[in-house]
Amino acid sequence: MMKQAGAATLSIPSNESYAAMQTGACDAVITSSTSLISFRLEELAKALTSGRERSYWFMLEPIMMSKTVFSGLPKDQQDLIMAVGAELEAFGQAGAKEDDTRVEAIFSKAGAKVSQLDEQSLSQWRELARETAWKDYAGRNASCAELLKLAEQVA
C-alpha cells in the first residue's frame, strides 16, 4: 500500500525506529501509539498523524494457547481462561485508547504538529488498501479471503 502511494518502504522492528529516524534511514514510522511513546520518537518527529479519531492501520496483539493444551484442561479452567481473556481485551482496548490520547499530548509538547485523518483522507487510504494490501491478503488462501470479507462487514 505504501509503495503504491509512492513511498520507499523499510520493514524494521519498532525498537529500531529511533535509530532509523535519527540516522535518516527513514523519514516516517507506522507503529502503535504505545511504541511511539515508549521509543521516544517525539524527540525526532516533526509531525504526528494520530490514530485517535480514525485510522487505516491497527495492531492485533493476541494471547495464544495451543488448542491441544486448552482442550486438555478441565472445563472450569477453560472457562476461567476465556473470562480472563475477555477482561484483558477490554483492558487492552482502554489502554490503547488512553495511549492514543497521550501520544498526541507528548508529541504536541515536543513541538510536533499533531493532525487527525479526516474522512476523505481515510477513504483515499482505504481505496488504495483495497487495491493493494487487501488483494494481496485475500489472495493468499481461502481463510484469508474469508477473514477479510468478515472484517469488511464490521461497522
Image: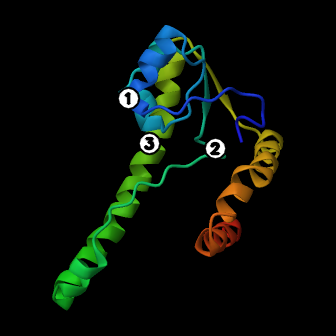
- The residue identified by callout 1 is 15
Would you place residue 123 above or below residue 29 in this image? below
Query: Where is 78 relative to 26, above or below?
Result: below
In the picture, measured across the screen, residue 91 lies left or right of residue 119, that is left
Q: CA distance from mark 1 to mark 3?
A: 21 Å
Residue that sits furthest to the bottom in the current view: 75
Q: Amino acid at mark 2?
A: Glu
Q: Looking at the image, which is closer to me, 51 or 15?
A: 15
Residues at discs 1 and 3 in contact (Cβ within 8 Å): no
Identify residue for label 2.
53
Query: Residue 55 location in percent, x, y?
Result: 65, 45
Q: Which residue is mark 3?
A: 98
Q: Secondary structure at mark 2?
A: loop
Kindly identify the residue that appears in the image at 57 percent across and 19 percent down: 26
Q: How many marks?
A: 3
| Image location of residue 92, percent across then percent down | 38, 54
| Residue 22 x %, y % | 47, 10
Q: Residue at x 76, y 39 (%)?
A: 118
Q: Quadrant of the C terminus?
A: bottom right
Mark 3 secondary-structure assignment: helix
Which kind of residue does numbered mark 1 sit on? Asn
Q: Residue furthest front?
A: 140
